[in-house]
Amino acid sequence: MAFYKSPPDFVGDDTLTIEVKYPGGRTEIQKITVNVAGPGGQKI
């Protein structure tokens, strides 16, 4: 499980990387892009 919280007043694209470890030793790196539009914001 992962949680994301943007900095206060941040608007735009943010990228994060998580490492997922599975039983048996397998590991994956996942890159996720989050678009922060702000409360009630719409991207035009």
Image (spheres, rainbow, N blue to C red):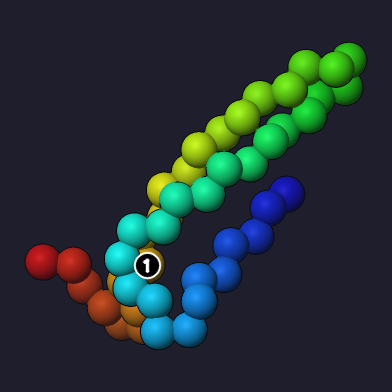
Above or below, comparing residue 36 to residue 2 in the picture: below
Image location (x, y in percent) of residue 7: 50, 76
Q: Quadrant of residue 13?
A: bottom left
Name the residue at 78% across, 17% down: 26
Q: Quadrant of residue 29?
A: top right
Name the residue at 85% across, 17% down: 25
Q: Residue under circle 1? A: 36
The total of numbered circles placed on residues is 1
Name the residue at 26% across, 78% down: 41
Neighbourhood count class around disc 1 (C-alpha, 10 Å): few under 14, some 14–19, many 20 upward = some
In the picture, measured across the screen, residue 21 lies left or right of residue 38, that is right
Which of 19 and 39 lies nearest the eye of the viewer?
Answer: 19
In the picture, measured across the screen, residue 4 lies left or right of residue 6, that is right
Above or below, comparing residue 23 to residue 10 in the picture: above
Which of 17 and 36 lies nearest the eye of the viewer?
Answer: 17
Above or below, comparing residue 24 to residue 20 in the picture: above
- Residue type, label 1: Val
In the picture, measured across the screen, residue 18 lies left or right of residue 26, that is left
Image location (x, y in percent) of residue 8: 48, 84
Which secondary structure, mark 1? strand
Quadrant of the drawing holding the C terminus: bottom left
Above or below, comparing residue 5 to residue 3 in the picture: below
Image location (x, y in percent) of residue 14: 41, 57
